[in-house]
Amino acid sequence: MTSVETKVREVQHFINGNYEASSDQQTFEVKNPATQEVIAVVSEATEQDVEKVCQAAREAFENGPWRTMTVAERCAKIRRMAEIILERKEEIARLEAADVGKPYSHAVAGEVPRAAQNLKFFADFMEQQGGETYPMEDAYINYTRYEAVGVAGLITPWNAPFMLTTWKLGPCLAAGNTAVIKPAEMTPLSVSLLGEIAKEAGIPDGVVNIIHGKGSVVGTAITKNTDVDLISFTGSTATGKAIMRNGADTLKKFAFELGGKAANIIFEDADLEKAIPVSIQAAFLNSGQVCLAGSRILVQRSILDTFIEKYKAAAEALVVGDPQAAETKMGPLVSEEHFKKVKSYLEIAKEEGATLITGGSTPELAPHLKDGYYLQPTVYLHEDPKARICQEEIFGPVVTIIPFDTEEEALQIANDTQYGLNGVVWTENLKRAHRISHGVRAGTIWVNCWFVRDLRAPFGGFKKSGIGREGGHHSLEFFSEAKNICIALN
Ligand code: NAD
C-alpha cells in the first residue's frame, strides 16, 4: 500500500480469544477520509453483544489465570505484545494512515513505536512496584498490597486510536485486570489488531476483548454494565459527562482525559527559530486533531508583526496531501461530519470579525484526493480572547493568534478557558518561565518545547479537561485496589 488503501477489510469483535460477528450480523462502513473510499466493513454490536463481551472479561478475571499468575510471567506477555507491534509497525501505521488520515510518516516513526513503548513501559514499571509498610510501635504492622480491580472498559477516541488504546491497556493488563476495549467507530482498524497480537503474545483468552459500534449504544452499554468495574475514557468533555451519568448507578471508578484549548504563549524574548516550527507542529500535527494542540497562540505585541510573518510562511510551507506519501505533513480531517464542524468555525470567525492570516479553504490536491476532507492550515488573528474561536475546541487545523502586552495579561488570557489540559511557554527568562508555569492552571506545561513525554510523569487535565492522572504510578493506582493488611505482633 503506497498510495491509498484499496482492499475492503472485514473487522469483527474480539471476544474471549476469537473474532466474531455481531449477534444480528449488523455492520457499518468505514471510509478513508483522504478519498471517501470504503476501506472496512465493521461489525456493529448490539447491547446483547456488549453483555457477552463483558461477561467474557469477567469470567477471565474471576476464573482465568491472568490476575494470579506471577507478575514476571504477566509482564513478559505484555512485553511480547510490544515486540509484535514493532514487528508489524509498518502495517499498523499504514492502517492508521488510511483510517484516520494521519501521515504515515508520523504513525510509523511516532505513534506506533510509542504504542509499543506504552506496553513495555508499564510491564517494566509494574515489576518495580512495592507497597508501603506502617509499623505501629511493636504492637501491629500494616502493609499494603495493590491488587487488580476487575474488568476495565477502555473507551478511546479516533485521533490516535492505537497509541491511546495501548496507553490504557498497558497499565490495565500489568495490574492484572481484564479489558473490554471500545475503539471509536470511525477508526476501528488498528485497534482491532490488538486481539490477534494479544493472542500471539500468549495473553489468555478473555483478557483482551474488543467491541465495535456506536458510542451511544456500545459505549453506554459498557458504562452501565454490572460486570465492568472501571472506565478509562479519552474523548470529548461532553461524552465524559454522559459516561459519568451512565456509570453512576453501578458506582464505576473513572479516569477521564478530555478536551483542551491550550495557550501557547510566545514572549518577546522567545527564540523564534525554535518557537515557530514547534508552534506549527503544535497547531497542525494530525490536522490539529490533538487534545494537546496549542490552538490559542498568545503573542507579545512587540513581536507580533515578526511572528505573524514567519508563522504565516511556515504554515503555508506545510505539505498537505496523501497521508500515505512520505512527504506529507498534514492529511485530511477524519470524517465528513467533523469536516463540517471544523468548517463551521470559519463562518464563526468571519462573524466574530477575526482577521484571516492564511488558509481558510481547500488546498491544492492530487486528483485522487479531490473528495477528501481537506482544509488548509488556517491562522486567524483576534484581539478578543472571549471569541468563540478562542474558547471552543475546534479540533482541526485552525488556530488563533491573540496579542498581549504584559505577563499578567498573558496569564489571565491563558487561564480564561474551561479547559486545563496543557500550556506552552516560550521565553529565555528562567524566572518568568517558572512564574508562568506555576500560574497556568493546566496539567502539563511545556517550556520551550511541546509534546515531550516521559511516561513516568503525570498526564491529565485541570478543570473540564479531565479527572485523574495517567502515567507511571498514577495509571497503576487507577487500575489497582490498595489493600491494607494489619497484623498483630503479640
Ligand atoms: P468522543 O467523546 O465523541 O468519542 C470518544 C469515544 O467515546 C468513542 O469511542 C465513542 O464511540 C465513545 N462514546 C461516544 N458517546 C459515548 C457514550 N455516551 N458513552 C460511552 N462512550 C461513548 O470523542 P472523539 O470525537 O472521538 O475525540 C475527540 C475528543 O477527544 C476531543 O475533545 C479531544 O480533545 C479528546 N481527546 C482527549 C485526549 C486527552 O488525553 N485528554 C486525547 C485525545 C483526544
Image (tube, rainbow, N blue to C red):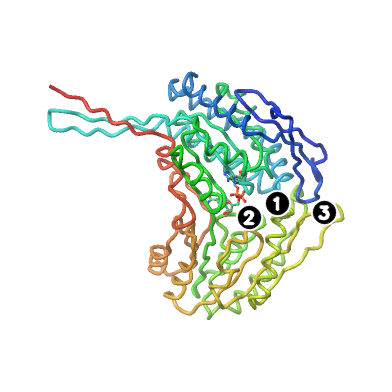
Q: Which mark is residue 369?
A: 3
Count every numbered label the image shows and give the total: 3
Mark 2 close to ligand 1, CB under 8 Å: yes
Q: CA distance from mark 3 to mark 2?
A: 19 Å
In the figure, residue 45 lies in which quadrant? Answer: top right
In the figure, residue 304 lies in which quadrant? Answer: bottom right
Identify the mark nearer the N-term, 1 or 2.
2
- The residue beneath circle 2 is 289
229 w.r.t. 56: above or below: below
Q: Depth-wise, is mark 1 or mark 3 nearer the camera?
A: 1
Q: CA distance from mark 1 to mark 2?
A: 9 Å
Residue 216 % position (x, y):
62, 44
47 w.r.t. 421: above or below: above
Within 10 angstroms of label 2, few (less than 14), some, or many (20 or more) residues?
Answer: many
Q: Residue at 51% across / 29% down in the picture?
A: 178
Q: Amino acid at mark 1?
A: Val
Q: Residue at 38% across / 63% down in the picture?
A: 438
The answer to whether residue 39 is left or right of residue 433 is right
Q: Residue at 39% across / 65% down in the picture?
A: 439
The answer to whether residue 221 is left or right of residue 252 is right
Is mark 1 in CB contact (under 8 Å) with mark 2? yes
Quarter the N terminus occupies: top right
Residue in front for this viewpoint, 414 or 429:
414
Quarter the C terminus occupies: top left
Is mark 3 in CB contact (under 8 Å) with mark 2? no
Q: Which mark is residue 334?
A: 1
